[in-house]
Amino acid sequence: MSAGFKKIACTQPRRIACISLAKRVGHETLNEYGSEIAYQVRFEASKAADTRILFLTEGLLLRQFSNDPGLTRYDVVVVDEVHERHVHTDFLLG
């Protein structure tokens, strides 16, 4: 966040990981949960207008990619847990 990026997306393979990582990172960075650090999974989200780091599932990012191939809403996309290879990860890396 101190590097100047406004919107960072960090993918996780499972929804539980998205939620728990958003809470942990929010706690460790002393940010109120759901403000600058948030999560978004299918049918549930905690993001706000001032969210800077968003943890989301790989499937959700693929869905956003189908509408916006450049993923222009994000400055940085981090594909985490890449060693757990499956179809969604392969599409994101391709």
Image (cartoon, grey):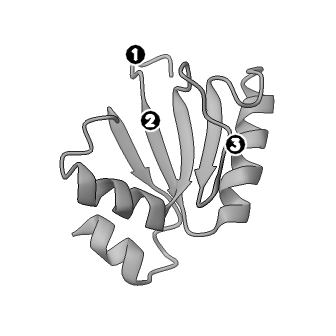
- In this orientation, which residue lies closer to the viewer: 63 or 58? 63
Residue 40 against residue 34 in the figure, above or below? below
Task: Tell me the number on the disc at residue 22.
Answer: 3
Question: Disc 2 or disc 1, which is closer to the eye?
Answer: 2
> Where in the figure is residue 88, as x and y percent of width and height?
40, 75
Relative placement, left or right, of 73 versus 94 is right
Residue 30 against residue 7 in the figure, above or below? above
Task: Tell me the number on the disc at residue 4.
Answer: 1
Secondary structure of residue under mark 2: strand
| Residue drawn at 62 percent across, 24 percent down | 36
- The alpha-carbon separation of the residues under discs 1 and 3 comes to 20 Å
| Residue drawn at 21 percent across, 69 percent down | 94
Relative placement, left or right, of 3 versus 21 is left
- Could you tell me the amino acid type at mark 1? Gly
Residue projecting furthest to the bottom: 86
In the figure, residue 90 lies in which quadrant? bottom left
| Residue drawn at 46 percent across, 60 percent down | 60
- In this orientation, which residue lies closer to the viewer: 2 or 7? 7
Task: Tell me the number on the disc at residue 8.
Answer: 2
